[in-house]
Image: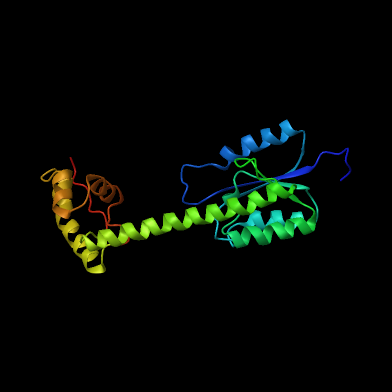
Amino acid sequence: MSASQPPRVAIYARVSTRDKDQEPETQLQPLREFVRAQGWAEAREYVDQAPAGDLGARVSWRACLEDGSRRRFDLLLLWRLDRGFRSVLDAAQTLERLRAWGVGLRSYQEPWLDTTSPFGEALYYITAAYAQLERAVLAERVKAGMARASREGKRVGRPPVEARAGLRRRWAQLRPAVLTGELSRRAAARELGVGPATISRLLATGMVEGTGIPRLPERPS
């Protein structure tokens, strides 16, 4: 790339499969606007809907790095650093690869990260380390909460098989009464120890999830 030519920029966006309310466009639109405002030439967009650690599902990320190795763009722009990397080691190794290819890296949400400068590169490693620490602290909090719930006798995770089997039997007995109106949904929920929303789902599907209990025929009016 000559000094007179604008850098060719690749945009990468990722949303996790757990982020049900997120759409890639939430990241892509401001990234496109930022590229235009800088006067850069947009090379290509890469989008994944996968967890950070699932490299097998992050097909676009792998394609992005492959194109980077072939110098199809000069700068990689991320929404945020954690959209691209799952650990400090991953971030460091990827940066080394990008440097060898002559590709710089920028973060939209972290504008101080600019690996084309020595100071920005140092901040890159610091931010990657902080992001990993933040994920580790969150994981420890979740574990601590589950351990506390277990000590207090609260159920953690899915109920045991025996409990699910008991629920199936009791729902099969109660369902006809709920359908005829002899038993309210709220009363059935109290009887089964579940929420009213669960009763609504059971009625809608006609079975306990994963149990195969068939829907009973509705009585004619």
State the residue in front, 96 or 83.
Answer: 96
Q: Quadrant of the C terminus?
A: top left
Residue that sits furthest to the left in the current view: 182
Whether residue 31 is situated above or below residue 150 in the rendered picture: above
Residue 184: x and y, percent?
Answer: 14, 43
Q: How many marks?
A: 0
Residue 175 visible? The answer is yes
Q: Is residue 19 left or right of residue 25?
A: left
Q: Is residue 15 left or right of residue 160?
A: right
Residue 95: x and y, percent?
Answer: 70, 57
Q: How is the image coloured?
A: rainbow
State the residue in front, 208 or 10.
Answer: 10
Residue that sits furthest to the bottom in the current view: 162
Q: Is residue 152 left or right of residue 205?
A: left
**Residue 112 sits in quarter:** top right
Residue at horizontal 57%, vertical 42%?
24
Residue at horizontal 22%, vertical 45%?
196
Residue that sits furthest to the top in the current view: 37
**Residue 42 sits in quarter:** top right
Residue 216: x and y, percent?
Answer: 22, 53
State the residue in front, 218 or 213.
Answer: 213
Residue 213 visible? The answer is no
Whether residue 128 is situated above or below residue 26 in the rendered picture: below
Whether residue 79 is situated above or below residue 152 in the rendered picture: above
Q: Is residue 202 left or right of residue 110?
A: left
